Amino acid sequence: MQEGEEQVIAEWTGTAPSSVGGVPGTTVDEVLPIPDGCAYDELQVDIAWDVAAEDLDLDVLDPNGSVVASSGNLNAETGVAAESATAVAPRAGDYVASTKSYSNFETPFSGVATLRCVTVGGCYELVDDTVTEYPVPVQSTRVIVGVMDSATNPYHDFFYAGSEIYPEHAPTAVTPAVLAELGVEPENQIELTRTGDIAADIEADAAIWSRVKRGELVWFKGTNLLAISFAGTDVEPLVPQPIKSSHGVGTSAAVLKANPEAVVIMVEQGNDIGNDPSHEWTFLNPSIDIVSTSYGVSLALGLLPVPETRAFHAGFDGVVGQGKLHFSSSGNGPGLSPARAGAGPWWSIGVSGSEEDSSEGRTITSGRLPDFVSDFVQQLPYCMDCQSEIDTSVGGTSFSTPRAAGVASRVLLEVRRKYGHRGGVIDVDGVPTMAVGGEIPLTNWVLRRALEEAAWVPGTLGDPIEIALDLATPVIPQLAWLDYGWGDLSARSDKLVVEAALTHLSLGALPRTKPVGFCEFQTEIMLERMTYWNEIAPSLPDVFGGDSAQPLDSNPFIFCDSGLPHHPASNDPGGNYDPAADFDGDGVANGDDNCPEDPNADQADEDGNGVGDACDAPPSDIDGDGVVDSEDNCPNAANPEQTDTGDDGVGDACESAPETPIAEPGPGTVEVVSYDGPTGITTPVVCLGCGSGSDGFATHEVRYELPALAALTSLDFTLTAAPAEQLDMVIYNPAGEEVTAPVTDPMPGLYLAQITELVAFEGGFNLSISTTCPDTGCN
């Protein structure tokens, strides 16, 4: 099948019954039979009628009855009396085009369904229509997180055995049962060549990549990472390419850093961020438990955003209809999280940024009034053209969001293990339920309530100097909800978020108690969100596209007990911790037990820290440098001195190597380094990729090792970029002191140039480093 080929499989006419605002909600269905051996990779359905003042909507259902594509424009605003929806990777069976009446009067319409091949290089026909039946493996206890973003890099060491998250064993969460559940074909279970030279490895795997098709799920053997592409035809599906943004590498890694046992599916969107087919596949996929999105319209740099009026496409159906959790970034600006299309709707969870391991303040360059915060700056893989490098300061709510999703996935996985629940969300008397088998049936709403109670909150105001250096706002413990929402969904073990959530669900004995102010404030915000997204937003113009909330017979949300008369009464089945009970059965009541989840009748506490020896885990020091991992600025390489030139929170031992000189210093002025760096998109409006520095903006680091030269007079650094690019550069000498260029009488040693993107449009930059010596030479 050649690229561009198409086949019309159905044409029909019909009349859509009258409707006002979707009531009575009638549809006209047309069956679209897809033949065996289908080699096309898109099914496009179009409907059209005469007058745009009448409003019809369109759904496409697969043979299982699941909505796999939809279109619901406000036709009176668009002026177009038509809808179009595209389903990817159609398979043999009866699809259905469902035309829905919304605001119309007995409207005649016509429809056409077309199969297309859009894959670069053509589509591969099935050589044998015979389906071999294999025994279905027994479902496993697992958790699956879908991350919609630009792309990922499946060659990177981070995802494999020997990395910081899998130091001893290869990841094992992707079992035969998971592959069978997700429908990953054997030919799409691929093993990549990994020698350390990514360009050569991609070339060696050319035959593998040539078989990868858009809309087909692929598993990378040796990892917990799968991927599927809904990117445009301007890029090859799934293969790492420098023209692809590294943003998705960081977001997919952030989930696994918080929960290495999660199964992560990267839903590649390329430059078509937020496209409808990717949203439909992810939100409506019954196997996916949690969805993470890190994009949206955001006004940063002090500008306040205009509230959006439509929610992310298919998000309502995925959360309310299918029982998922949806985490979305609150933005890298001072705007309001509840006003964002991803983070704002009451069914979604908005995540802002905290300066974890530092001041613990809320990052100024992150949205206000979130549901939660999580670590704003992390050490993550962030490259499309490398296999081992770790970016030492990947920052932004883009990455705190998947970290929070990863923490939630840890809680869900632990509940499923304790319950003995296998597989994903199941239907229990019409209610999508994430886990059954225990005292409390776990829905997405119950899990969300447990996370609210479990989120960590700082108990002190914080160091004012650290807060200022972090560009953070101090968190006043007595009013922490103003900045932290419900709190920090921290992945750090000492903050006990997972344990506190399990305790709220009667599965542990490490409770967290919060002042009633959290419940009062967050309930008020939630009620305002419900009013806006249910009643106000649907009546406002659709500016950026998306969906509106659908009417419900009852509100599924689980409320805390605020005690205020105008707030809903609590319907929380959790929170039944009893300090007089004995969770571990050692004869000591929970409230008196210094290790309440592990039997220790003797209550031994050798170090006197209030935690029983049975619960005292020896501090981890992976690199053996005498600095425990939680305090080590380079935990994977020995550096007892903890030197950190540039004060970016990452030890020099973990920083990138110096650039290879293009020339040696000599008489006169000699350019010794010419570094061409990429830039992302960092603007006051669009924040995809914005943020890899501690202040939320992308930072690049270039190093040069200056040899000892007796007659060297100066060392110069010249930064050039496209006119629209606004970059800032700070230079450090080998003593770690900030200096200005040109550096006169420079000392020998390692120099560092830190380059920060303030405004960037992928125009790139060049850093030229030059030495100056007398005409007689440098020695």
Image (cartoon, rainbow, N blue to C red):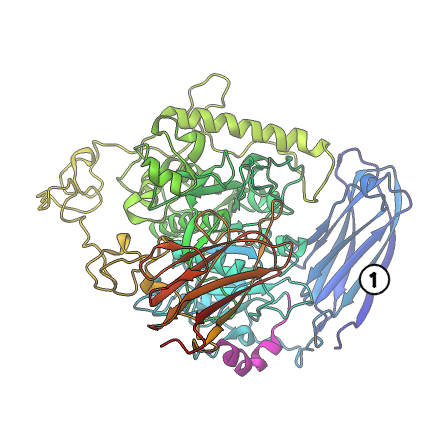
In which image quadrant can residue 689 be found? bottom right
Q: Closer to the camera, 669 or 152?
A: 669
Q: Residue furthest right?
A: 50
Residue under label 1, please give it.
Answer: 10
Give the residues in magenta.
Answer: 196-214
Which residue is at a point 49% across and 69% down the rendered structure image?
Answer: 154
Against 15, residue 139 (above or below) is below
Against 49, residue 650 (above or below) is below
Question: Residue 243's x, y, as percent?
Answer: 60, 67
79 to the left or right of 24: right
Q: Secondary structure at mark 1?
A: strand
In which image quadrant can residue 119 be found? bottom right
In the image, residue 211 lies in the stretch drawn in magenta: yes
595 to the left or right of 321: left
Question: Residue 574's x, y, as percent?
Answer: 37, 35
Q: Closer to the camera, 742 or 580?
A: 742
**Total numbered circles:** 1
- Disc 1 marks a residue whose amino acid type is Ala
Question: Residue 320's x, y, as percent?
Answer: 57, 41
Against 435, residue 187 (above or below) is below
Main SS, magenta residues: helix
- How crowded pointer 1 is (Cα within 10 Å; few <14, some 14-19, many 20+) is rated as some
Q: From where the camera sits, is residue 129 visible? A: yes
